[in-house]
Amino acid sequence: MTQLGFALQGYPDLAGKLGLQDIALPWSQQWPQPEMGYTQAVIMHIHTAVSHFLALATMAQEYMILVENQQCLNFIQDIQNLHDGGHLEWNILHIYQIEGSADARGTFGFHRAG
């Protein structure tokens, strides 16, 4: 079963609201504008030039949930730098870090339209 299949099994009311996108590609006007982006052990494996910055900047309009290994990349600082440099169209940036078992960490950022 795919990750989307597992999500739909647990949350069937999300049918028609979930999808996959290759976030390492430049943004396309033809792509849907997702409200929330979620990755689990994905971005930490993108090591080509600045592709992980591109992925972070294009993956969601309002919310991001990252379950990634902070030892691979400094996601919190990268997201802060993208925001400070105007690469995220977020008025206000909030970052929450949750420590899990075995050093698993999730980072959650969102904006509020002002």
Image (spheres, rainbow, N blue to C red):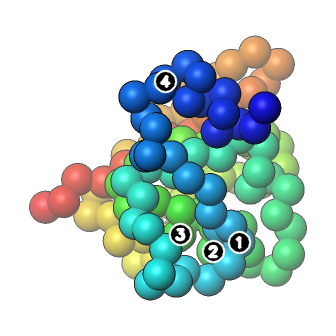
Choose the circle earlier in sequence order: 3 or 4: 4
Which secondary structure lies at badge 4?
A: loop
Q: CA distance from mark 1 to mark 3?
A: 10 Å
Q: Is residue 36 left or right of residue 89?
A: right
Q: Which residue is mark 4?
A: 11
The residue positioned 13% from the left and 61% from the top of the image is: 114
Q: Which residue is mark 2?
A: 54
The residue positioned 82% from the left and 63% from the top of the image is: 46
Label 1: how many residues lie within 10 Å, few (<14), some (14-19) or many (20+)?
A: some
Instruction: Judge depth for marks 4 and 1 and give the one in front.
Output: 4
Label 2: how many residues lie within 10 Å, few (<14), some (14-19) or many (20+)?
A: some
Q: Which residue is mark 1?
A: 24
The type of residue carrying mark 1 is Ala
The type of residue carrying mark 2 is Leu
x, y percent for residue 24: 71, 72
Q: Check contact, mark 4 vs mark 2: CB within 8 A.
A: no
The image shows residue 50, relative to residue 69, as above or below, that is below
